[in-house]
Image: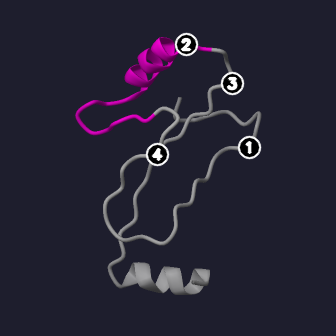
Amino acid sequence: MPIQNALENNAKGAVSMRADSYIIDSKLSKKELVKLAEALTNPILESYHIDASPNIKGNYHYAIEIGFKPGVTDNVG
C-alpha cells in the first residue's frame, strides 16, 4: 500500500498507536533492565516489553518505528 493510500485510509478511521522506544547500550542484567523499565513506565497508562513486541490486537498491515539517530539527545528521557 503506497503511503498516500495509507494516509487516506487513516482519514477513513484507521487506528494509529504511539510508543516510546529506548535502546540501552549497556550490559545490564535482566533484573536491572526490569527496574529501569519500571522507572520509565507509568503503570496506570503504559506497559513495557523487553526483547519482545507488544501484543497488538486488531488487523494491521504495518508497524513503523521511528527513532533518534545515534548521538541525538533523547528528549523524552
Q: Residues within 10 Å of mark 3 (few under 14, many from 20)?
A: few
In three-dimensional space, the C-alpha distance between marks 2 and 1, rounded to whole angstroms, equals 25 Å
Residue 20 location, x and y as percent? 48, 42
- Compared to residue 41, the image places residue 59 above or below, namely below
Of the numbered discs 4 and 2, the one sitting upstream in the chain is 2
- Determine whether the residue tagged by mark 4 lies in a helix, strand or loop: loop
Q: Nearer the viewer, mark 1 or mark 4?
A: 4
Of the numbered discs 1 and 4, the one sitting upstream in the chain is 4
Give me the disc on residue 25.
3
- Determine whether the residue tagged by mark 2 lies in a helix, strand or loop: loop
Name the residue that disc number 2 marks. Answer: 29
Name the residue that disc number 4 marks. Answer: 53
Of the numbered discs 4 and 3, the one sitting upstream in the chain is 3
The front one of 65 and 58 is 58
Q: What's the residue at 67%, 33% (across, down)?
A: 73
In three-dimensional space, the C-alpha distance between marks 3 and 1, rounded to whole angstroms, equals 14 Å
Q: Is residue 44 magenta?
A: yes
Name the residue that disc number 1 marks. Answer: 69
